[in-house]
Amino acid sequence: MDAFDPEAAACALADSLRALGTPERAAGEKGYLKSDLEFFGVTVPDIRRTVQVAVRSHPGLDREAVLAWAAALWREPVHERRMAAVELLTLAAGRLTADDLGTVAKLLRESGTWALVDGLACNVAGAIALRDPSSWPLIDAWAADPEFWVRRSALLALLPGIRAARPDLARFTRYAEPMLAEREFFIRKAIGWVLREISRRDPEWVAGWTARHARDMSGVTFREAVRRLPAGDAERLRALRGAPGPVA
């Protein structure tokens, strides 16, 4: 069998993606994401299917080969190439380790958009951490990082554990409380998103946490936090948030 060439594999995958794009979608996506990247104009389902086909054509790749392939895809400033790198790492997340979080952090810093950050944070970093608890000290540092996309990623890395019924509520509180005062929309939205996910299984905990922080939350955080709570709890929290005086 010929040796795997990550650069050639990246070029072949990029060619497949380019053929699926349209100029109209490329212009629309570029404007929607306010991105400086080049766009082929490919839908997310088509990107995922194309990556899956490409992975099946290279069976048995080891961790180092996958990382090299993802790096080759990422190197060019093309949105779909970078989305493909995220999908490739997502498919390989079971083979990645805490040692690879430095690579993930580098990609997070270079992403510049939720469309790349969220998959890296949840499906890659969060999946690694769910399997390998030694990842958490590294992700803890992300929560205080100067780059807001990295701080958002610390929050979203908690989602796989929540969805697996293994929520780390103390860690969420450590991450989220210092961020409640932030004005960045994507931080505010992420805090609310995590609360909404926790509320699917533990609405009582979310109602209590929200009650304690109701006056400190932004509107978007609060709306997400109460979105899936029982109607009575949500109404009580809305009244509490709007009432004068200190929160009990």
Image: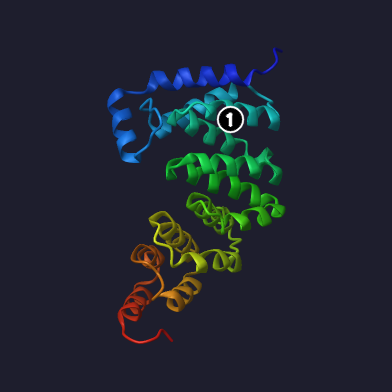
Residue drawn at (38%, 22%) of the image: 20
Crowd around label 1: few <14 · some 14–19 · many ≥20 (10 Å):
many
The quadrant the N terminus occupies is top right
Residue 51 relative to residue 115: left or right: right
| In the depicted structure, whether residue 86 falls above or below residue 133 | above
Snapshot quadrant of residue 90:
top right
Q: Nearer the viewer, residue 165 or 143?
A: 143
| In the depicted structure, whether residue 64 falls above or below residue 113 | above
Q: Nearer the viewer, residue 131 or 149?
A: 149
Snapshot quadrant of residue 10:
top right
Image spot of residue 27 (x, y percent): 29, 30
Name the image colouring.
rainbow
Image spot of residue 147 (x, y percent): 51, 51
Residue type at numbered disc 1: Ala
Residue identifier under label 1: 70
Residue 11 relative to residue 234: left or right: right
Snapshot quadrant of residue 9:
top right
The quadrant the C terminus occupies is bottom left
